[in-house]
Image (cartoon, rainbow, N blue to C red):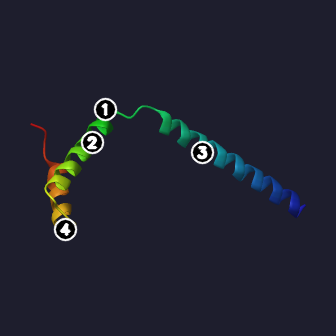
Amino acid sequence: MKTLITVIALSLASLAGSAAWAKDAAEKTAEPSPARTAQREKMKTCNADAKAAGKKGTERKAFMKECLSAKKQ
């Protein structure tokens, strides 16, 4: 009886895990929102600017924070 309960519990856990994995996979294949796309572009631009300016370490971190928090004009 104990073995049967264990098998059932493991089966249910496996099914729950499969459903969660399928949901995650579906979300990853969906098109990103316009806000997410804009943020990615902003990160690319700020990263390129930091690299071009030769910023490293703490200086780069401060630069990225300032650049990413800047409002679009």
Residue at the spot 21% in from the left edge and 49% down from the top edge: 48
Q: Alpha-carbon distance for marks 2 and 3?
A: 26 Å
Mark 4 or mark 1: which is in front? 4
47, above or below 6, in the image:
above
Determine the secondary structure under disc 1.
helix
Residue 7 in the figure: left or right of residue 41: right
> Which residue matches tag 1?
34
Determine the secondary structure under disc 4.
helix
Q: Position of residue 21 (x, y in %)?
A: 60, 45
Amino acid at circle 2: Gln
49, above or below 55, in the image:
above
Residue 13 in the figure: left or right of residue 67: right
Residue 35 in the figure: left or right of residue 9: left
Of callouts 4 and 1, which one flags the residue occurring earlier in the amino acid sequence? 1
Q: Position of residue 70 (x, y in %)?
A: 13, 47
Of callouts 3 and 4, which one flags the residue occurring earlier in the amino acid sequence? 3
> Which residue matches tag 2?
39
> Which residue matches tag 3?
21
